Amino acid sequence: MEAAFFAALQGLKPAIVWFAADEARMESSPDPAIHYWSILVRFVIYTVVAMLIALLREHRDELERDVQRKTARLQEEIAERTRAEREIVQISNREQRRFAYNLHDGLGQQLAAVALRAKLLQEKLNGAETSQEAAAIVGLVKEAARQTRMTRAYARHIRDR
C-alpha cells in the first residue's frame, strides 16, 4: 500500500501543472467555487487512479515472484524425479544381470550336472527297471535346464529393451 501511495505522490507533478492551467481559466468562470470543486474532483480521481495502477503493478510483481518461485521448485522436483528414475533403471538393470547370472552360473550348471549324473546312472543300470526311472529323471532335468535357458533369454530380452 505504501508503494501505491508513493506512486500517487510521484504523479502529483502533472496534477499540479493541470491545476495551474485550470487556474488560468478560472478568471473567466462566473463562480469560483464550481471551478475549485471541479479541480478537486479531478485531482481525487487522478490520485485514486494513480494509486490503483500502482496497486495493480505491485500485485503483478508479487504474482511474477510467485510464478518464479513455483517454477524453480517445479524444476527442482523434475530434476529429483529424473535422478530417481535413472537410479531405478540402474538398479533394475543390475538386478536383471544378477538374475541372469544366477540362472546361468547357478541353477543352469547344477541342472546340467544332475542331468549328466542321471545319464551315467541310466547307462550303468542299462536294461533294468530302474534304468527307465533314471531316463525319466534325465528327461525332467533336461526340461528344467531348457526352461532355465528360456528364462535367461527372456531376462536378457527385457534388459536390452
Image (spheres, rainbow, N blue to C red):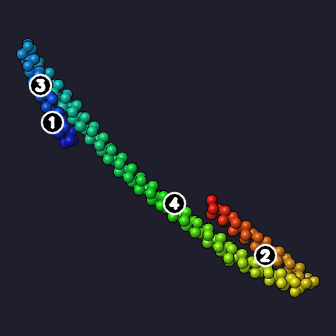
Q: Are marks 1 and 3 in contact (CB under 8 Å)?
A: no
Q: Earlier in the sequence, mark 4 or mark 1?
A: 1
Q: Secondary structure at mark 4?
A: helix
Q: Secondary structure at mark 2?
A: helix
Which residue does the numbered mark 4 point to in the structure image?
85
The answer to whether any part of residue 80 appears in the image is yes
Rate crowding at label 4 as few (under 14), some (14 to 19) or many (20 or more) other CA atoms within 10 Å: few
Query: Of the numbered discs in the image, which one, if any, rests on residue 141?
Result: 2
- Which residue is at a point 45% across and 55% down the rendered structure image? 78
- Which residue is at a point 65% across and 70% down the rendered structure image? 100
Measure the alpha-carbon separation of dots 2 and 3.
107 Å
Q: Earlier in the sequence, mark 2 or mark 3?
A: 3
- Residue type marked 2: Val
- Which residue is at a point 26% across and 41% down the rendered structure image? 58
* In this picture, residue 69 sits left or right of residue 13: right
Measure the alpha-carbon separation of dots 4 and 1.
56 Å
Measure the alpha-carbon separation of dots 2 and 1.
95 Å
Measure the alpha-carbon separation of dots 2 and 4.
40 Å
Q: Earlier in the sequence, mark 1 or mark 3?
A: 1
Q: Are marks 2 and 1 in contact (CB under 8 Å)?
A: no
Which residue does the numbered mark 1 point to in the structure image?
9
Query: Of the numbered discs in the image, which one, if any, rests on residue 19?
Result: 3
Q: Earlier in the sequence, mark 3 or mark 4?
A: 3
Q: Residue furthest bottom?
A: 124
The image shows residue 139 at horizontal and vertical percentages of 83, 74
